[in-house]
Image (cartoon, grey):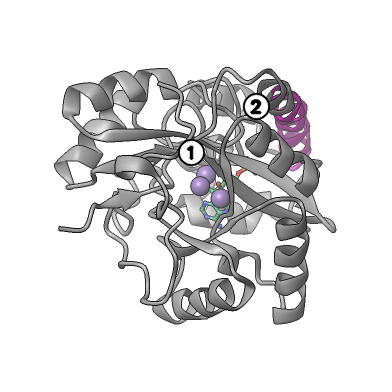
Amino acid sequence: MPVEYDLHSHSLASDGTLSPAALVARAAAAGVEVLALTDHDTTAGVAEARAAAMEQGIELVAGVEISVTWRRQTVHIVGLGVDPDDARLQSGLAGLCEFRAWRAEEIGRRLEKAGIADAWAGARRHARGVLISRTHFAHFLVEAGHAKSVRDVFKRYLVANRPGHVSGQWAALEDAVAWIRGAGGQAVVAHPARYRLSGTRLRQLLGEFRECGGVALEVVSGSHSTEEMHRMAGLARSLGLLASRGSDYHGPENPWIELGRVPALPTGCVPVWSDWPQGLPLVVNQ
Ligand code: AMP
Ligand code: MN
Ligand code: MN
Ligand code: MN
């Protein structure tokens, strides 16, 4: 029987809505055997998730999803099998969280000018981990009746040319990959089809990523269509990148994404886990 891998998920430590322990329990119930917790810019949920995984009898891969600015575009780089105690990784992530704190205040000020009061305080109530994300603003704006759904909030308030937009100043691609590798992990380009890059630019991104020491592409993602998955599988094969698989689960409020409920890797892809002993990354620090 093939092992069931879900290598991309979020908890309350970033912008997910389940605690790390509840996330792991749900993954186990859904038949996931190896789960990576990949919160945005933090590993704060890993210890709790690891303890829960021991109880549930599944494997937990310590991960992170690092926010990167590449040629003025936000790109997400997942790290799998990182040592959460690595000092350089943690100082890099701390810098990103500081930017997040400043950006949140700025989003609050801009929304205030647009006539929406108390958004910063409201978003902070939803942010129960160490960092604050646009998702927390979205939850507040829906709750306060300014929009009908999270998707609607993003479209109307939080993206470029909208009143609550503040551009990202995230990590450099080479730094994010270096932090991940320095912490013993494998770097993966998350949901590559989401960036709406032309074929040429996507190849440029992946070329630079490989030169920095990145090794894998998230071919199967909860946010990819079947056609996008096959296109990304072809790219991974032609560029010699390993392939990853993850749902990008954020919580039960998103009923169209469930833990482990994504297609199997297309044939011809070399899985990112192919050289993990017994399903786990080589350098897993338990
Ligand atoms: P941040 O990293 O704080 O800028 O927030 C990015 C997060 O917002 C992503 O990881 C998604 O979880 C969420 N997000 C981004 N765009 C959308 C959208 N259009 N609809 C719903 N959620 C979104
Ligand atoms: Mn998110
Ligand atoms: Mn992402
Ligand atoms: Mn994600």
Q: Quadrant of residue 101?
A: top right
Residue 274, horizontal then vertical, whole percent:
40, 55
- Give the mark toward the camera: 1 or 2: 1
Is residue 163 in view from this perspective? no
Residue at 36% x, 68% y is 265
Q: Amino acid at mark 2?
A: Trp
How packed is label 2: few (under 14 Cα within 10 Å), some, or many (20 or more)? many
Quadrant in which the N terminus is drawn: bottom left
Q: Amino acid at mark 1?
A: Thr
Q: Is residue 107 magenta?
A: yes
Residue 236, horizontal then vertical, whole percent:
56, 71
Whether ligand 4 has any atom under 8 Å from the Cβ at mark 1 is answered as yes
Whether ligand 1 has any atom under 8 Å from the Cβ at mark 2 is answered as no
Q: Quadrant of residue 92?
A: top right
Residue at disc 1, secondary structure: loop
> Pointer 2: what residue?
120
Residue 41, horizontal then vertical, whole percent:
61, 33
Residue sitting nearer the eye, 133 or 41: 41
Q: Which mark is residue 38?
A: 1
Q: Is residue 87 left or right of residue 251?
A: right
Q: Quadrant of residue 118?
A: top right
Residue 206, horizontal then vertical, whole percent:
70, 65
Magenta-drawn segment:
94-114
Residue at disc 2, secondary structure: helix
Q: Earlier in the sequence, mark 1 or mark 2?
A: 1
